[in-house]
Amino acid sequence: MYRPMLENDVDHVAELDRQSYAFPWTAGNFHDSMRAGYRCCLYEESGSIMAYAVMMAVVDEVHLLNLTVVPALQGLGYGAAFLRRLVACSRESGFAVMWLEVRPSNLAARGLYEGFGFRQVGLRKGYYPASHGREDGLVMVLELRNAQ
């Protein structure tokens, strides 16, 4: 089941982010995103969160800021199913393009995005914190009119 993220979900989502990333979002980041009106949503089964996402809408564009599948469920198709839903909902809402940044080292995510038709259009130098300094961010875009 797909549903909006609620304030009482945030502590659990922030804990899942800590389990997923060396440099996770904080509960404050998720709360701030919700207060700013970003599209924060969950995919859950039997009351358990399987994946979550945060998207920022600007005019006719949507920026995917965070898409995370719970670590134990990665590689099982949840990311593709959730992204398919996010792309379809964004297209139905009238957005023309979806943007995102991804670490060059995150080969699984890059493969997922490229499989959906995202293409690299830029590079943000030193965008992400890393264990030894900073890591670049690949800027990718998907034309939603042509999306799966």
Image (cartoon, rainbow, N blue to C red):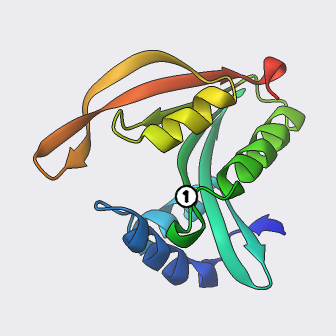
Considering depth in this image, is 15 or 107 the residue closer to the camera?
Answer: 107
- Res 25 quadrant in image: bottom left
Residue, x 66% and y 59% (percent of image)?
76
Where 37 falls versus 128 (above or below)? below
| Residue 77 shown left or right of residue 105 in the figure | right
**Amino acid type for the residue under numbered disc 1:** Thr
The residue sitting at the top extreme is: 121
Instruction: Residue 89: give x, y in percent of width and height.
Output: 83, 43
Looking at the image, can residue 118 be seen? yes
| Residue 103 shown left or right of residue 141 in the figure | left
Considering depth in this image, is 133 or 62 the residue closer to the camera?
Answer: 133
| Callout 1 secondary element | strand
| Residue corresponding to mark 1 | 68
Estimate how packed mark 1 is, as few (under 14), some (14 to 19) or many (20 or more) residues with alpha carbons within 10 Å. Answer: many
Considering depth in this image, is 9 or 67 the residue closer to the camera?
Answer: 67
Where does the C terminus fall, quadrant-wise?
Answer: top right
Residue, x 81% and y 18% (percent of image)?
146
Residue, x 75% and y 22% (percent of image)?
96
Where does the N terminus fall, quadrant-wise?
Answer: bottom right
